[in-house]
Image (cartoon, rainbow, N blue to C red):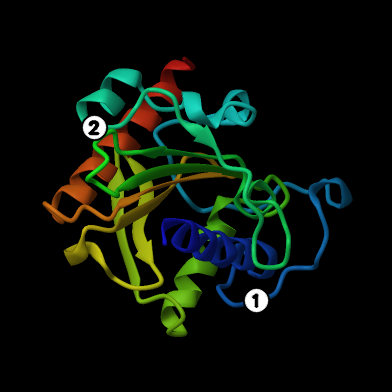
Amino acid sequence: MRRVIILSAAALISISVAGCADTEPGEALPHGNSSQSSAAPSNSLSFPSELDVGSYMDRPCDVLSPELLESRGYPIEGQKLEETGPAGQRLSELTGPSCSWGAKETTHAQVLSVSLIDQPSRGSEAVLNGVRERHRSGVLQLWEEVEVAGYPAAYYGLRDNRDRGDCAMMVAVSGTAIVTVNAGPYMDDPRQACVDVDEFVTDLIDNLQKGV
């Protein structure tokens, strides 16, 4: 079940990355990769400082602090996701490098996952605009914009299942990079899912700022 949820989010983000402009929501971008365009994307987002995810692209499982993982019932060692998407694409090609952690307690089914997305040819604002458009068109039920440590963020989901213990957030950490954190289902205490996501996002930003 969790694999389906993660893949659905991956497909949603990949569509938004590929097809939406960073200036006017809904405008199509020319297809192509970063090697085909050297122009930097325009970006009106503001950040306390632009964070570099590059050092974690090969090791996404190291982006969260071991102490926080343990305190929230997850193992220190995560599993780098290598699953394939609906059309046979590797998950890392849809969303960028990803890692997941399963709850230590076997009676708890919750899974935590993190994805790192870097789009130098399109920019983080294009990704946010694209997912926001999916919400406006009814594809995405949940899109609630917030701010974490001064960085633009949003709770998002194909369905709003926060009351069932599922929570997901995406955060723009630079003009090109977005990180996502997903957790759930928290059957025993549904409200704790977003509490944990908030703490993991804050921890992730702190680690990027420190460059650890």
Q: Residues within 10 Å of mark 1 (few under 14, many from 20)?
A: some
Secondary structure beneath label 2: loop
Instruction: Please state which amino acid type lies under the numbered disc 2.
Output: Gly
**Residue 110: percent from left, percent from top:** 30, 48
Q: Which residue is outermost to the bottom?
A: 137
- What residue did someone put label 2 on? 73
Task: Please identify the quarter of the rendering in which residue 202 is found.
Answer: top left
**Residue 47: percent from left, percent from top:** 43, 39
* Vertical comparison of 76 with 169: above or below: above
Q: Residue at x 63, y 68 (%)?
A: 15
Instruction: Please state which amino acid type lies under the numbered disc 1.
Output: Glu
- What residue did someone put label 1 on? 27
Tell me how far mark 1 sits from mark 2, CA to CA: 43 Å
Q: Residue at x 45, y 25 (%)?
A: 208
Q: Residue at x 28, y 44 (%)?
A: 197
Q: Observer-nearest residue: 109 or 97?
A: 109
**Residue 52: percent from left, percent from top:** 56, 29
* Vertical comparison of 137 with 113: above or below: below
